[in-house]
Amino acid sequence: MYIEVLIEIKNKHVDKTFTYMVPSNLVMEIEIGKRVLVPFGHQTLEGYITNILPSSSIDSREILEVIDSEPVLTNEMLEIGVFLKEKTLSSLSACYSVMLPRALKAKKGTEIKKKLETYLVLMIPLEAALKKCKNESQRKVLELFFNRDKILKKEATIISSSVKTLIKNEILKEVFEEAYRYKIASHLKGELKKLTSLQQEAYQKIYQGFYKERVFLLHGVTGSGKTEIYFHLIKDCLNMGKSALVLVPEISITSQLVHRFSEIFPENIAVLHSNLSDGEKYDEWRKISRGEVNIVIGARSAIFAPLQNIGIIIMDEEHSDSYKQESNPKYHALDVAKKRSEIHHCPILLGSATPTLSSMARALKQVYTYVPLLERANGKVLPTCEIVDMTEEVAQRHPILSRELECRIIEKLNKKEQVLLLLNRRGHSTTITCSNCGFTYRCPHCDISLTYHKSSNTNRCHYCGYTVFKEETCPKCKEDSLNYYGLGTEKLEDYLNEIFPTAKIVRMDRDSTSNKGSYEKIIQDFSMHKYDIMLGTQMISKGLDFPLVSLVGILNADASLNIPEFKSNEKTFDLLCQASGRAGRKSTTGEVIIQTFYPNNFVLNCVKNQDYFKFYKFEMNIRKTLKYPPFYYLVHLSIKSKDYELAKMESLKIKKYLSSQIDSESIILGPTTANMFLVNKVYHFEILIKYRFDKKLLKVLKELDEQFLIYKNVTLDIEFEE
């Protein structure tokens, strides 16, 4: 017997299978999708079995070992891997690797052990055991078995000597059982809420699409009760004997959602996201693959969960950029969801208060099924919104909080209500400059200034991670004249503590949530009103539900409008609408204050009026004129090298080659330097292709990709956007 093995090397140059012979003693263990240990050159590597051959004309070496008792790659995953390879032009081994937890990747040396719990079981009936007791401490151990078949050994550790005696006398026996490391905090069992008439209408429209490969767009304003509809649809799936996959964009959303799900579907949930330890991911993955749960909740990578018989795939907050992976393979979770929908013949439900323009365009053209839910579930009106011109506030020496926002915060604190403040920039100060000689701290590896982080007393690069400790004097002129400009969440926290000394304030950003479990703790504490004010970056803007939040303040609201990217308007609108939606979700009336230097900006005024369709029409006109999605598809080509001249020269060659090969109707822009030109000592050039129908393009891009496999000093990355 011979097998084809895909070696775990992410180098696309060796992205192919190799044929190996199977020794007779391992033949019965061979199965497609399992990992094997093989000799490869002078190394010993792991790989995946992708095919079984009865014979081979190739002189092949023998495999050394079959690693798995069960396949780690199912037939469905093998199919999705091939799909991803074609979709993203990545190596097949990278596509399989991104699907699996670390413990199951074909990477030699990766070993994560199962967690075992030690139990004690009775070898004889309890009454007979009690009669054999020699002392009171042995009796206390045995009394733990009343109405129980087994107990955890650690329950009896305080009388361990008696346990040892009972085991020695064959009254008790030790047994080892596997235990899962991730525990969902127990909650009281909850009931499904009765849907409102609008929710029921939306639910029925989606329910009728079960067993069909259809995409539904649930356009529900913040607080409209989209999650309740999810619950009812999942309940239907379970009643049909099917499973459900629920994706959320942020880890911060996952904890609240998991707790809510656990009340409705106790003991039937697995969780997958990047904040879990390798051991926890391994446990959750096996729990899913064994069919022990029927619901999976998680972030982007959960789309690969080995669920069987999927009845529905839900993508909450579908507008989020977090569903797109930035490293290779650069997949979008929606593309994988569509492939799984095709395999399982199940619907996809996209939920958002601010759907992407592309999704809405498809819905209005009936490519997707549009499901509106444009009123809040509890009869509450959407929060009132006010725009404050910061030009006048800065002139009056109120550069951080406007007088209006400061007064409103005091008012809410006096009413024992809570406040959310959004500032989408972490750190303390964004620029450190010497007023004496003009020196500015910049990253030596990247084309960017360093950000000062007060909590660690360091200046950091947010791109490559370069870090230096803060100095008291200028490193160039040695004068005590360093000035710290710009506003980050740390500086805002200091300021709030100064002007609201009696308020309890918590900060939620990547720095304050770096420790395991910190997301959950902050969210739980804020929900229990242990804090009055929560400030943070975009992670506080979506999916969170705090009943006492009556005021949302948005600082530097226009910052993202100035990012040189065609989606900057859309991202700003999404972020601000989502943040606004955190206010007034329950009994309190919601208020939102947006601070900006551009009070007449069209996008900000659409946010103020919560007018999605007015923004949609405005932005679609711009996209159509400038030939951007959804009217055109895009391909981004990134040319990277540590040698500036080489990167520039190769970029020009690529442009020339593309111009001679692809359709004349397609538009090629560039090459030009990227927005972040130098990152970690690597120069970045970009080429952008806009196209509608170009039959030659994919073939040409594949040829380009293959040509650059032999280059050692230049890297070509290709990324598709629809």
Image (tube, rainbow, N blue to C red):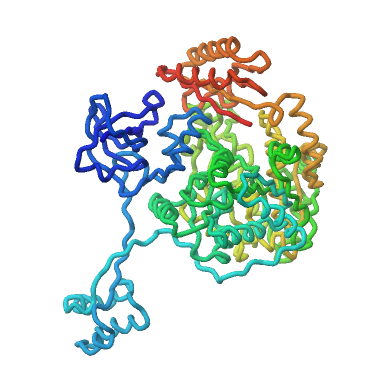
- Which residue is drawn at the image coordinates 23% and 42% (left, top)? 26
| Visible residue check, residue 210 | yes
- Give above or below for 675 relative to 195: above
Compared across the picture, whether 162 is left or right of 719 comes to left
- Quarter holding the N terminus is top left
Q: Indicate the position of residue 681 as horizontal and vertical percent values.
A: 47, 24
Q: Indicate the position of residue 183 as horizontal and vertical percent values.
A: 45, 62
Q: Nearer the viewer, residue 435 or 146?
A: 146
As drawn, the residue found furthest toward the left would be: 168
- How many labels sit on residues? 0
Q: Nearer the viewer, residue 454 or 534?
A: 534
Q: Indicate the position of residue 58 as horizontal and vertical percent values.
A: 26, 24
User: Which of the 4 image quarters holds residue 525?
Assistant: bottom right
As drawn, the residue found furthest toward the front would be: 54
User: Which of the 4 image quarters holds residue 622?
Assistant: top right
- Quarter holding the C terminus is top right
- Which residue is drawn at the image coordinates 62% and 47% (left, top)? 212
Q: Nearer the viewer, residue 312 or 573?
A: 312
- Give above or below for 127 relative to 495: below
Compared across the picture, whether 456 is left or right of 131 comes to right
User: Which of the 4 image quarters holds residue 229?
Assistant: bottom right
| Visible residue check, residue 494 | no
- Give above or below for 712 relative to 266: above
Q: Indicate the position of residue 634 as horizontal and vertical percent values.
A: 63, 26
